[in-house]
Amino acid sequence: QVRLVESGGGFVQPGGSLRLSCAASGSIFNIQKMGWYRQAPDRGREPVATLTEDGTTYYSDSLKGRFTISRDNGKNIAFLQMNSLKPEDTAVYSCRFVTFNGGAVRAYWGQGTQVIVSS
């Protein structure tokens, strides 16, 4: 059974940085896309960043230049480096991996990690 587990969240002051990790366990193959999403208490879930197998990245316009998505291919881990954090970045951050095997697309989600940005 595939599981995604996020880590690295926590409390940080405005202007600070955090690095989130998302590690996959179990039999997961052919990851086509790794992504990070976030959901604040008063908002719906929104995409943050995506990294495809060929290295193409996508970032939410409001986050460009502050957040960086990367991966460790050998260990099926995705990272999200978050710099210059703002109070409005406070949210639960979740990762999502999309695989393609035998003609079937599957998406896996982690449970999320809380990020609180406050002075």
Image (spheres, rainbow, N blue to C red):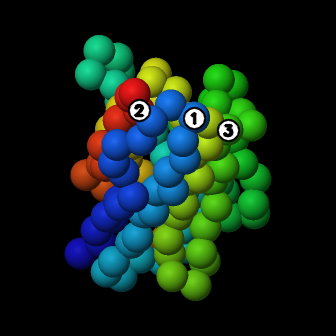
Query: How many numbered dots are placed on residues in this image?
Result: 3
Q: Earlier in the sequence, mark 2 or mark 3?
A: 3
Work out whether 61 lies above or below 6: above
Q: Earlier in the sequence, mark 1 or mark 2?
A: 1
Query: Dot 3 corresponds to which residue?
Result: 66
Name the residue type under label 3: Arg
List the residue tagged with mark 2.
117
Q: Earlier in the sequence, mark 3 or mark 1?
A: 1
Q: Is residue 9 above or below residue 78?
A: above
**Quarter of the figure with residue 45:** top left
Measured in 3D between alpha carbons, the distance from the residue under mark 3 to the one under mark 1, in whole angstroms, is 10 Å
Q: Amino acid at mark 2?
A: Val
**Front position among marks 3 and 1:** 1
Element at badge 3? loop
Q: Are marks 3 and 1 in contact (CB under 8 Å)?
A: no
Residue count near mark 3 (Cα–Cα under 10 Å), binned few <14, some 14–19, many ≥20: few
Residue 6 shows which numbered tag? Answer: none
Q: CA distance from mark 1 to mark 2?
A: 9 Å
The residue wearing badge 1 is: 15
Estimate how packed mark 1 is, as few (under 14), some (14 to 19) or many (20 or more) residues with alpha carbons within 10 Å: some
In the displayed structure image, the side of residue 69 where residue 38 appears, left or right: left
Q: Name above or below for residue 97 compared with residue 82.
A: below
Residue 81 is left or right of residue 110, and the answer is right
Percent from the top left, x then y, of residue 35?
Answer: 52, 50
